[in-house]
Amino acid sequence: MSRYKFFAVVLVMLALAPLCVAQTGRQVDRQQQGRESDAGSIHVFVVLPNGAPLNQAAKLTLQTPRGSEFVTYTNFQGQYEYKRVPVGNYDLVAEDESQKFEIATQRVQVMKDLPTVVTFTLKEKSAGTAATPGHASVSVGELDKNVPKEARKEFERGSKAAAAGQTDVAITHLQKAVALYPAFMMAHNDLGAQLLEAGRLAEAATELRAAAKLDPTAYNPRLNLGIVLIRQKQFTAAAQVLDEAIALDPQAPAARLYAGMAYLTLKDFERAEKELRLAYESGGTEYAQALFHLGQLYLSRGNRALALQHFEAYLREMPNAPNAEQVKKLIGTLR
């Protein structure tokens, strides 16, 4: 996803397998959903007034067109993803548990097969009220209260352009944001994500390294940098960075998926198998790509039976995958 945009991650298509998104979440009101093909997703970021990620869980309430409500909580970086949400208009409410900020509401439109990105920038209830972290681990980004107003505006413009798929426009605004305020970690991350989307890998790596250096506790820059390094075929470096991302958020399946792919290329089959299995177990259908790569792993080790089992499972989960025809032919040779 989220992927809003502190553009959490831009995940790339590798080995003709389908895209995945980084954040995990439950399905919204299963009884409300029509066909999965008529669904999209909502990627949420809740950020502080200075643009830094919220360092605590935020309560989210999604109000469906039929009047039901779905209440959940973000992770401790203020991020959440609603998966397979039926197309339509929804009201989404965000509030922090510390009650130091005003309740924020946005109308959200979900479109078929597209991610909808929502950023909530919390506003303090009264002037001069400091945002206190919700737990002992304090992010460097949250200590910085000096993001200039104009830099924040450029960041917001870039976020809106990215959500609309206007990559070049988003890059221009985000470049202005980091030029106005070089310590703007989220802007560096989002700029790196958009440069990745545009295929400008060397520039993307520079921005993502800058973001990671600004905040040693930030998961997203490391995930995105790992993806860039895989695209650059720097698999050893990618595995190292993705291990850092896993250490920061062990529950997120995206870093495990890409770590598994990196270790598979490095022929560290034991580690690749572990990460790919955990990616699928924690991410479910959205991370069925892991099954495809597990099939590749077992095939490379000469275990045709297990390879066949995983390729078949992959197609059951993703019958319309971009590489479905190739996988069907491969299955035919294995039977």
Image (spheres, grey):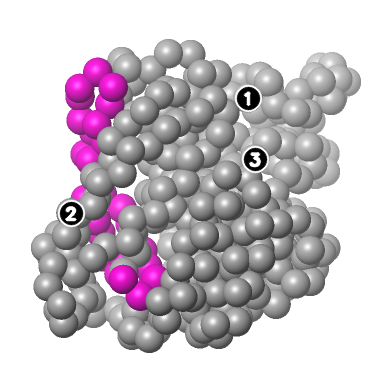
Residue 135 magenta: no
Tag 1 and tag 2, C-beta contact below 8 Å: no
For the point 50% across and 28% down, the residue is: 111
- Amino acid tagged 1: Met
Part of the protein shown in magenta: 49-77
Looking at the image, which is closer to me, 177 or 315?
Answer: 177
SS at circle 2 = loop
Pointer 1: what residue? 318
The quadrant in which residue 290 appears is top right
Pointer 2: what residue? 103
The quadrant in which residue 234 appears is bottom right
Looking at the image, which is closer to me, 268 or 3?
Answer: 3
Above or below 181: residue 176: above
For the point 35% across and 75% down, the residue is: 50
Q: Is residue 282 visible?
A: no
Residue 107, given in percent of the width and then of the height, sits at 33, 38
Tag 3 and tag 1, C-beta contact below 8 Å: no
The quarter of the picture where the C terminus appears is top right
Q: Going from the N terminus, do you reach mark 2 or mark 3 first?
A: 3
Disc 2 versus disc 3: distance between alpha carbons?
A: 33 Å
